């Protein structure tokens, strides 16, 4: 995966303690910050997504990153670069979608320029006051794995779009207009006492678990039957892979102590070792290394 | 100017008090934030700029925006989208250039993705602690206009590049590797008591003056002979236009009281009326409306 190589180069040049989590935690300012790019024909196609939905999704993926840190989403800025043929109505709908998704998180500025293709870059700021901030390296043996959101719906929706299908609409909506887990994040970050790991499932549930396992030097074992998903996914022959390896659901996954876990959907536990272990419904028990998961995502999606 | 129309649409949809200055001032968090996009073949050409210089410039234009607010530049994030053919060395040099320009401002995260062309979006955070924050609408009749930086060098450098010329190198360097006015900004923001207007000259000195005049409902009169510029610019027949209307010098211009102005280069004064008045060296006195200036920039550059 080329982007992972480049990330290593960046880490080496910057030699910064901030690089590693979805958000950078700027303790002196009491904020976290994150930034994500959405590029036409790489992350989305104009044929598949309306400008309103693109605005919505651009805001939501960044709000989701803030939620993964445990901070309170507060402000967004957006750099928008657009081809000449894009009209005023596109821009209006884009910002309406962004504002609707932001739902009180304020859009406070940014930039608008020309470009050959649509390019969106959103930066999001979260406030850490009264919240305990997560780090993916915080997972400890004995912690429970809890999740929020339905898994697999977004990648099912993407597949429907690619096949030119329009039903079930709920999966397409999950892909084009995801929702960040704002409340789950707040509940945990306001109440938890001990250090904890949390990530969003933007690159899939298994990837998030794998990143947490690697950063913490632990194994994560989950029980597939406990993962929340839409039962209609079963029309897809490979629905188990959609649930584990499909991206862009923007659910959250966290490794927390029992006292917090008891109020949420627990799907597994942090154990000694490495990688991710899945207990399937048929009794099969499968270990995935980081490379297994990366290959699975790369070959499957 | 299409982008100005789109900006009006955005302002209408968002109905936000934050849109208007180069930075959004988030008082509750004690920070300002800004974001700028740099797009290949719109803002730069790969033939003219090295990856190190592109990294440098991407950081500096955003640091300059922070300086325009009076805040202390603290953190940067960068969303970088790159074509397949870009190699690891490009990314390494880009980040080295960014880090050199940042000069202590920390690069704390961002995103790296694919794209057809190079797309850079940088967000910058400034800390407001101990600083008085500017707003372009703060200009008041009687205030002096002070400036920092040399004006016209960057647009002269761009012209040399477009003509395939390599000398004088200082102008090309001014275009490719500008410097933000960090100290000027700090001196003012730490010492000033009254409200003041400040902007960077990213779109040219006249444009900055015009924006301040319009936002404050005032006229700004300047004496051309007092503007700091490199005397070698006189080899260009239209050097007066380069100085007034050429962009990307990333100087600063501010409207401040006499007590502050006395320590800096004053070039004019805030008066009743509207637009920008220039007293030329030959005794000519010329009034420019906002539209005059926009047309001049559009037709000339």
Image (tube, coloured by chain):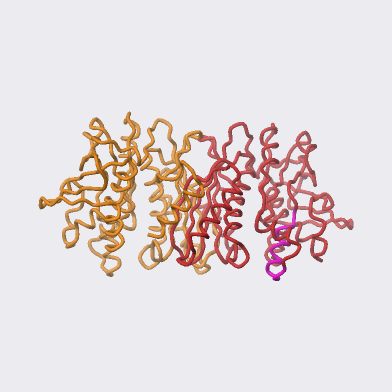
Chain colours: A red, B orange
Q: Nearer the viewer, residue A221 or A117?
A: A117
Q: Quadrant of residue A296 in the image?
A: bottom right
Q: Main secondary structure of the magenta part?
A: helix
User: Would residue A211 be found to the left or right of residue A73 on screen?
Assistant: right
Q: Nearer the viewer, residue A157 or B159?
A: A157
In the image, residue A50 lies at what x, y percent?
Answer: 60, 61
User: Would residue B158 be found to the left or right of residue A86 on screen?
Assistant: left
Residue farthest right in this picture? A282
Q: How many marks?
A: 0
- In the image, the segment drawn in magenta is A151-165
Q: Nearer the viewer, residue A106 or A191?
A: A106
**Residue lying at 69% horizontally and 31% vertically, measured from the top left:** A193
In the image, residue A237 lies at what x, y percent?
Answer: 81, 66
In the image, residue A87 lies at what x, y percent?
Answer: 48, 63
- Up the image or down, B160 lies above or below A19; here it is below
- Up the image or down, B7 lies above or below B32; here it is below
**Residue lying at 25% horizontally and 57% vertically, measured from the top left:** B170
Residue farthest top in this picture? B193
In the image, residue A241 lies at what x, y percent?
Answer: 77, 61
**Residue lying at 47% horizontally and 34% vertically, measured from the top left:** B27
**In magenta stretch: residue A190:** no
Q: Nearer the viewer, residue B236 or A161?
A: A161
Q: Is residue A8 visible?
A: no
Q: Quadrant of residue B55 in the image?
A: bottom left
Q: Is residue B115 visible?
A: yes
Quarter of the image that includes the N terminus of chain A? bottom right
**Residue lying at 47% horizontally and 65% vertically, measured from the top left:** A83
Quarter of the image that includes the C terminus of chain A? bottom right
């Amino acid at each position: 995966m080329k982007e992972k190589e480049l990330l290593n180069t960046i880490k080496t040049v910057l030699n910064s303690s901030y690089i590693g989590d979805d958000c950078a935690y700027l303790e002196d300012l009491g904020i976290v910050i994150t930034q994500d790019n959405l590029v036409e024909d790489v992350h989305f196609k104009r044929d598949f997504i309306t400008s309103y939905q693109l605005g919505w999704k651009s805001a939501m993926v960044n709000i989701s990153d803030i939620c993964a840190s445990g901070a309170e989403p507060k402000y967004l800025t957006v750099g928008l670069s657009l081809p000449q043929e894009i009209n005023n109505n596109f821009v209006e709908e884009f910002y309406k979608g962004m504002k609707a998704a932001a739902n009180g998180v304020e859009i406070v500025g940014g930039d608008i320029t020309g470009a050959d293709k649509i390019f969106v870059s959103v930066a999001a700021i979260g406030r850490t006051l009264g919240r305990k901030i997560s780090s993916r390296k915080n997972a400890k043996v004995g912690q429970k794995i809890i999740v929020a959101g339905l898994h697999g719906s977004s990648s099912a929706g993407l597949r429907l779009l690619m096949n030119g299908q329009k039903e079930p609409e709920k999966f397409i909506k999950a892909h084009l207009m995801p929702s960040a887990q704002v409340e789950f994040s707040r509940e945990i970050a306001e109440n938890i006492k001990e250090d904890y790991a949390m990530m969003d499932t933007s690159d899939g549930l298994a990837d998030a678990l794998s990143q947490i396992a690697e950063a913490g030097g632990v194994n994560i074992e989950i029980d597939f039957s406990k993962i929340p998903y839409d039962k209609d996914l079963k029309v897809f022959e490979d629905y188990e892979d959609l649930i584990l390896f499909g991206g862009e659901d923007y659910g959250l996954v966290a490794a927390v102590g029992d006292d917090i876990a008891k109020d949420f959907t627990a799907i597994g536990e942090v154990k000694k070792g490495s990688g991710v272990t899945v207990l399937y419904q048929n009794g099969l028990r499968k270990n995935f290394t980081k490379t297994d998961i990366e290959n699975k995502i790369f070959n499957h999606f």
